[in-house]
Image (tube, helix red, strand yellow):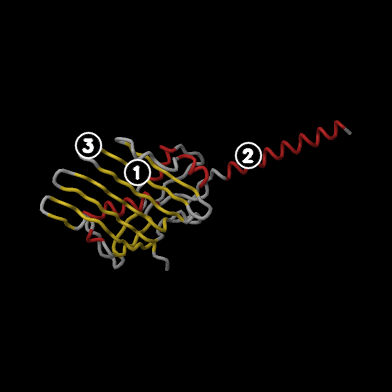
Amino acid sequence: MKSLAVVVLTIVITLSGGFLTETVRESMVYSWAIDVGDEFEYDITVIGNRTTSTGVLPPPLEPMNNTRIAVEITTLPNLTMMYYSHLFVQEVVNSLKTSSQFEDGSPIPLEHYNIINSHVSMSLIPIGAWGHLDSLFPDQVNRDLGNHESFMSRFESDFFFFGYWENQSRPRPRIDEWYGIYDVETGVPSLIVISVVSIGALVSDFYTITMSLVNE
């Protein structure tokens, strides 16, 4: 009976290890919940200002304030099972995945297009491996550092946060930040926020662009 108990215990441990391995594997599988050709709309607001030696002006992207854009998924990178942080940024985040225009089909002015479309594209991420993705990036960055950049993430029960922060001291002090708040079922950000603080001898910028997903 003792030998039989040992055999049974060995089988249970082996099976448990197999189930655990499968669970861990599934928790690291990334997949796209969106397809090429899918379209989304975002309402855009721009707040802030540009200060000069002669006065206060609207921020650079002020013409995009109170507009609505249509975003189309044009391509999606192939996904692998295992990512390191730099590989995820290089192959997924920095891959251009979208094209954008105003909701009526008219083009977004080129001087505003790149910043709008590139940030929407960077904000689209695959679903599934939220816990693993969260482990690749810190929850926050040390904002007291000098020249520094970092991606950051945070996984909550009903949403995922993913963003980027960069501090530059030359040629002039500048802080760039963007982040998305995600629906964990789709990987599509319900909110994208871009903030810029740039301080110069003649011109300084302080503005925030907020893109809110239109639910239809």
Residue with the mark numbered 1: 165
- Looking at the image, can residue 90 be seen? no
Going 13% across and 55% down the picture, which residue do you hit? 55
Looking at the rendered structure, the secondary structure element under dot 3 is: loop
Q: Residue 47, image x and y in percent?
A: 27, 58
Label 1 and label 2: CA atoms lie apart by 35 Å
Label 1 and label 3: CA atoms lie apart by 16 Å
Label 3 and label 2: CA atoms lie apart by 48 Å
* Disc with the residue nearer the chain's start (3 vs 2): 2
* Disc with the residue nearer the chain's start (1 vs 3): 1
Residue with the mark numbered 2: 21
Question: Viewer-proximal residue, 99 or 127?
Answer: 127
Q: Residue 207, image x and y in percent?
A: 26, 53
Which residue ends up furthest to the left in the rendered image?
54
Q: Amino acid at mark 2?
A: Thr
Label 1 packing within 10 angstroms: few (<14), some (14-19), many (20+): some
Which mark is in front, 1 or 2? 1
Going 62% across and 42% down the picture, which residue do you hit? 22
